[in-house]
Amino acid sequence: MPVRKIPKNYRNVTGVAAHRKAEGAASFESTLERDFIALLEFDPAVERFEVQPITLDWSDDQGRARSYTPDAIATFKLHGQPRRTVLYEVKYRSDLHANWPDLRQKFKASIRYARQQGWRFKIVTEVEIRTPYLDNATFLLPFMRRGPSEEAHMALLTDRLAEMMHRTTPADLLAACYQDEWHRAALIPTLWYLVGTRQIGTDLDEKLTMASPIWSLPV
């Protein structure tokens, strides 16, 4: 569970994000933190994450006792590779520039602590978070949570994609399944579910549209 309860804040947007991988409440106190939580939830390599998991006690340059709570911790597992854990701080670049003398000391304490645990410490900003990949994650996550409309739709879409030399576009794949627009529309939630769960491939670093290239992935 988060070590610090996030209060309501009238300067920033606060709330609790929908999640499946989070341990405890996935609370956020800015839209940037909310967007980062979405990326953790969407990333298939993330096994689990936790928001504000620990508070570090440290001393500043004047020897004064200080404390600091990083924003999140995530455990990653890639096939064939050992698990790795990353401790995160989420900050706007303007905040980094304005408050760097104080933040630098906090981050040095976090780096030391992370190394002692065998973890990494990483700062992420809007430059890394707010990308087309985030837009795609935000779009696809509701379909992933809802699941496919019907199991038969999954087989129909993947079989048609294989018949189309394993590469096409969402619009053309739907057209190859049905001529009737209502039946095509019924397939759309399952199509995006398959893309979001990486059962159908696409370039998630480019804006996802009905004309985006999609392709079959190895089973």
Image (cartoon, rainbow, N blue to C red):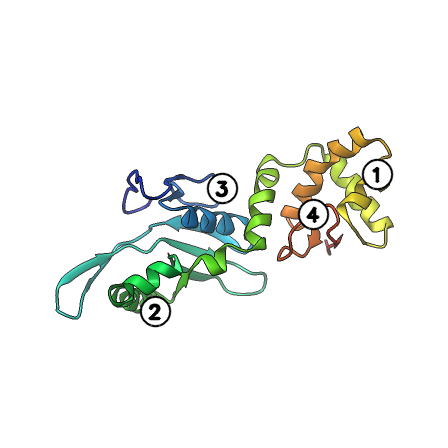
Give the Cα separation between the discs numbered 3 and 2: 28 Å
Residue plotted at (31% across, 39% down): 10
Give the Cα separation between the discs numbered 3 and 4: 26 Å
The numbered dot on residue 209 is 4
Q: Residues within 10 Å of mark 4 (few under 14, many from 20)?
A: few
| Tag 2 residue | 115
- Under circle 2, the secondary element is helix
Q: Residues within 10 Å of mark 1 (few under 14, many from 20)?
A: some
Looking at the rendered structure, the kind of residue marked 4 is: Thr
Q: Looking at the image, which is closer to me, 187 or 13? A: 13
Residue 157, above or below 57: above
Label located before the other in sequence (1 or 3): 3
Residue 50: x percent and y percent? 39, 49
Residue 129, above or below 30: below
- Under circle 1, the secondary element is helix
**In this view, the mark in front (1 or 2):** 1
The numbered dot on residue 20 is 3
- Under circle 3, the secondary element is loop
Residue 197, above or below 119: above
**In this view, the mark in front (1 or 4):** 4
Question: On the picture, is 30 further left or further right than 136?
Answer: left
Looking at the rendered structure, the kind of residue marked 2 is: Arg
Looking at the rendered structure, the kind of residue marked 3 is: Arg
The reply to whether callout 1 and callout 2 are in contact (CB within 8 Å) is no
Looking at the rendered structure, the kind of residue marked 1 is: Cys
The numbered dot on residue 44 is none
